[in-house]
Image (cartoon, grey):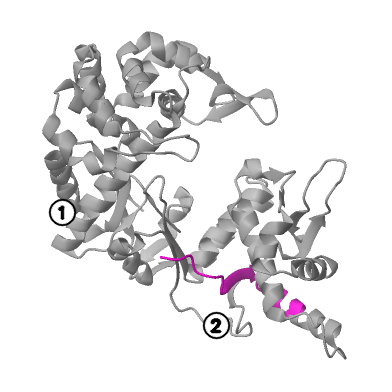
Amino acid sequence: MRKQQIQYVLIPETSLEVINEKLNEQNYGLTKDKLKLKNVLLIFGFILNQINKAEDEGLDRGHLSIYHKVLEKQYSNHYKCTHFLVEHKLLHRFNYSNQGKKCSRYDLHNDYLLDNLVRVNILKPNNTKDNSFKVLCEGKSIQKYKHLIDPFKRITIDYTSTKSYIDNQYLSREIKRRKYLVHKSAISSIKNRSFYFRNANTDKRLHTNLTNLPKHFRKFLRYDEKTLVNLDLKNSQPYFLAVIANIILNKDQSTLDKLKPLLKSVKSKKASKPTNYYKRISELFDVPFDKKELNQFINSTCQGRFYELLVSKLEPYIKEEKNKFIKTKFNKKKKRREKDGFETKRDYAKNSAMKIFFSSEKSTEKDITFFKKEFPAIWKLTKHLKGNESSNFAVLLQNLEAHLILDKITKEANKQFNAPLFTIHDSIATTKEYVDDIKHLILQVLLETVKLTPKIDIEYW
């Protein structure tokens, strides 16, 4: 499916009146070179969207650098629009610096920071009461997930409560400006019924408004006025690695053959070439591994206890400061070591596991050096799987997750129960009456497909 052109934008509610007023003043008496409202709204909405979805490392002192060629793709005379928006205090702009070779940096003006966001049709900008279901779909295979898109037509959010919650967080300085803008954009998109669905070519996951919604906002969601219940695969990334370990330990060719279409070509954005994991896993059938250690890993993962096992091994290395468990890491961009705090030891261990599984074998990080010593068989397995293209390994686990959750479980659940289904990568949310049936189905499908079942946590939103 081709990427759709921008037709709707989210902008601060009170800004539309200001834009109309100032634009009429500017265009008064002109017979040509008038600045069109639709172009101003397009650039304004596009810049705000870029700010709201940018990763922290893409920001410069809290403001987003945007290359002029990016704006040019939206509208060739974009500079007239940005000048108008800055002049009338809708945007802050810090101009290009020849000395630092930086692009212009943008941020929303403070006057509109706490404003509600409304959806505006750039072709019919004065109709702000249109709350019909609007969808932006990206990805060649997106239509096969229609059963996961349609339920969004009936999902709502308690916007007043959620907005009040994040306003209080920001005003009490619990969250910074950057996070406030991101959170407000996330809840405003749902409130305005502007949904996006992206099936990425690399990780094969389905990215939606819910995958981008912070956990503590989920309690404000409703489906036909009903609360949602989430079924989460506990220790999910270790579980998908355990699936591969189990295939290798048991030389399980039949299960490997089932997964062949998924495994034969896996490539991350960073990798120079794809990896044929079907061939690589087959080759590992004859590599000697410590069966006792790998079986301990498989069992602890399927019981949902791997992170607790890791905590027991990491205990002597974990430092506590101000009721948080501290880990130091090297920030490559800032070229210095920084502290990262975790609420629980389990969160600490989970972060360590992700770093261990997906880092290069050449890494000298303390966690990785420790893991090599305490879990040599698991390290040996991940080393073989990574090969010369270590970044492909993370994509392998994501592809396996997407295949099992999206292509196997949700399709069968939709066929059997016609239940509302919402996926958040390694978990499936539904309404209360379907929880038991879908939990049973998850375990059944995984047992039939990969011969291992994980522990499933049930969370009532």
Q: Write down the quadrant of residue 210 in the picture.
A: bottom left
Which residues lie in the magenta part?
1-19
Identified at 48% across, 50% down, the residue is: 214
Residue 461: mark: none
> Residue at position x 13%, y 28% from top?
252
In the depicted view, which residue is nearer to us: 305 or 238?
238
**In the orientation shown, which residue stands out farthest toward the top?**
373
Q: Provide the residue designation for mark 1.
A: 437
Number of marks present in the image shown: 2
Q: Position of residue 137 (x, y in %)?
A: 43, 65
Q: Secondary structure at mark 1?
A: helix
Decide which of tag 1 and tag 2 comes sooner along the chain. Answer: 2
Q: Dot 2: what SS?
A: loop
Residue 8 sits inside the magenta stretch: yes
Which quadrant would residue 246 be assigned to in this image?
Answer: top left
Of residue 93 and residue 266, the one placed in the foreground of this image is 266
Q: Residue 83, how many percent across, how many down? A: 82, 67
Q: Which image quarter: residue 133?
A: bottom left
- Tell me the tag on residue 129: 2
